[in-house]
Amino acid sequence: MAGQGGVHNFSWDGIVPHECQPNPDNILRLRVNTKWEIAREPLNYAVDCLQNCGIGPGMAFANAILKQDPNFGVIGLVPCSKSGTGIHAWIPGNLPYEQLINRAKISLRDGGTIRGLLWYHGESDSKYKYSARDYKSKFIKFIRHLRADLNSPLLPVLVVVLHYPKKPFVGKFVNVVRQAQMDIDLPNVIKVDANGLPVGSDGLHLTTQGQVQLGNMMAQAFLNTKFQYVKSNSNKIYHI
């Protein structure tokens, strides 16, 4: 989810497609200092990366939600990604997990409702047999811990199923991780398959076009799914 669209030689080209443009009235971002601001690309700047942070699916997702449902409300995006982490890192007590929980809880202090988690992960685990083999069980534990710690037992989770990488990236066990993601059988876990989306020269990360397509696909999956969910009527800010 960090976003590498438009990143070449560890530097972002600064090109923002119209699908990812800011929406000052309706799309906010929780900064690294936990203050709300107008969301803009690169969405994960300073939270996960600096100069090599580019376009991800988050802004395209939010804009697509509002395009199809103009009355959806204000969307608060809360970036929490940590590039290069395996699934073993996302457990209570470890920094990536604790940062996610902390930022999610902080996002609620001004009111709002957490409407879902967008999860695009698994490339690092596809390199090694043991981590690929354990992906399903560890991811299920992650979701259960997450829902318990956020007091949201049916929190919607949109999982991006990995695409097949190309050279020079070598992920010998991507099939194992893909199957693990496909096999997750928990309520309110929705899969979005990234296979076939355009990949950059590193063979791993999606291009800007690919990130936009993925964001649109995730938005459509979110809107098409009848989640088991109880809304809060206290406000109109929805944190995704």
Image (cartoon, helix red, strand yellow):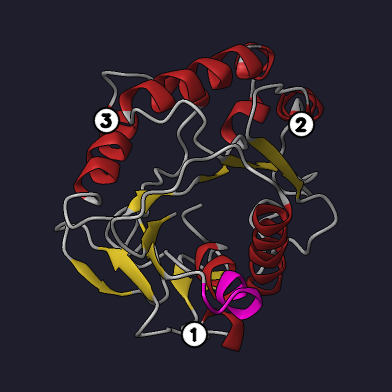
Above or below 230: residue 187: above
Is the magenta region chiefly helix, strand or loop?
helix
Q: What amino acid is at disc 2?
A: Arg
Q: CA distance from mark 2 to mark 3?
A: 26 Å
Residue drawn 40% across the image and 19% down it: 145
Above or below 188: residue 224: below
Residue drawn 26% across the image and 37% down it: 99
- Whole-percent x and y of residue 11? 44, 71
Secondary structure of the residue carrying numbered label 2: helix
Q: Is residue 118 visible?
A: yes
- Whole-percent x and y of residue 227? 63, 42
Q: Which residue is mark 2?
A: 178
Q: Which residue is mark 1?
A: 21
Question: Which label number is shown at residue 98?
Answer: 3
Instruction: Kindly indicate the quadrant of the structure image that contains residue 190.
Output: top right
Instruction: Kindly indicate the quadrant of the structure image that contains residue 33.
Output: bottom left
The magenta segment is 64-71
Residue drawn 43% across the image and 70% down it: 73
**Nearer the observer, disc 2 or disc 3?**
3
Decide which of tag 2 and tag 1 comes sooner along the chain. Answer: 1
Q: CA distance from mark 3 to mark 1?
A: 30 Å
* Quarter of the figure with the C terminus: bottom left
